[in-house]
Image (cartoon, rainbow, N blue to C red):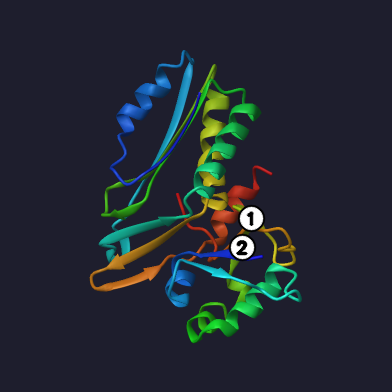
Amino acid sequence: MGLRMLYFAWVREGVGTGEEQVEPPADVVTVADLIGWLKGRSEGHAVALAEPARLRAAIDQRFVAPDAAIAGAREVALFPPVTGG
Amino acid sequence: MIRVRIQSEPIDAGGELAAAEAEGAGAVASFTGLVRADDGVTGLALEHYPGMTEASLTALAEAAALRWDLLGATIVHRVGEMIPGDRVVFVAASARHRAPALEACAYLIDRLKADAPFWKRETRGGDSRWVEARAVDEDAAKRWD
């Protein structure tokens, strides 16, 4: 199953794209696993995703914790803590 | 009535306020957030997560309407490029009396800052950087838990 990845703010700039389709292997179970696996995609990914503590995530447009399972997800977004208002 | 809008055009605070006042409430409280020019800021860019932003703001407005029995809740947030003095966000709450209107208005802006997927990038002359989240904003949001 393909997964649609979205990136925002400096994560998007570091990765080099705001959106990409990925096919994580079966041993990628949680958001934290996914971040670890995505680091191997390019030097940009490795730098942007180097510090998971600085990242926040959403699965199918809902905020989730790093230990959330990605099973059944269509869309996962990674971004810095929000700064609106 | 719940009104939620994300827009790249300037926010018409007077028009939004007039719409809130037309709901038959005895009290309307509103908050307007502006781009500050302090520390030499010359520009502000707002990025958001289309789809999730609208959903989270609608959920926020509905939660406020339920909690304070509001007649109306408005959230308008601007995105894209702005300059100091521009309105970034406008929220309003309409209720029968002032206490729920004022409380709901504070709730809307406090929670919006913590719960809605927006990101700010400040420009100072030729230099541009992403704004870091502030602990004080998280504390302000938590007081409504």
Q: Mark 1: which amino acid? A: Phe
Please give the name of the residue rendered at 70% of the width and 75% of the height, measured from the top-left corner. A33
Check disc 2 and report its element: helix, strand or loop. strand
x, y percentage for residue B127?
A: 29, 74
- Residue A37 versus residue A5 in the image, above or below: below
Labels 1 and 2 touching (C-beta < 8 A): yes
Please give the name of the residue rendered at 54% of the width and 16% of the height, measured from the top-left corner. B96
- Residue B127 versus residue B14 in the image, above or below: below
Q: Residue furthest left?
A: B125
Please give the name of the residue rendered at 66% of the width and 65% of the height, measured from the top-left corner. A1
- Residue topped by disc 2: A57
Q: Pick whichever of labels 1 and 2 is earlier in the sequence.
A: 2
Q: Residue furthest top?
A: B24
Q: Residue furthest front?
A: A1
- Along the viewing direction, whichever of B113 and B38 lies nearer the viewer: B113
- Badge 1 local density, few (<14 within 10 Å), some, or many (20+)? some
Q: Mark 2: which amino acid? A: Ala
Examine the image and state in which quarter residue B55 appears.
top right
- Residue topped by disc 1: A63
Asked whether, in this view, residue B18 is left or right of residue B108, the answer is left
Q: Chain of mark 1?
A: A
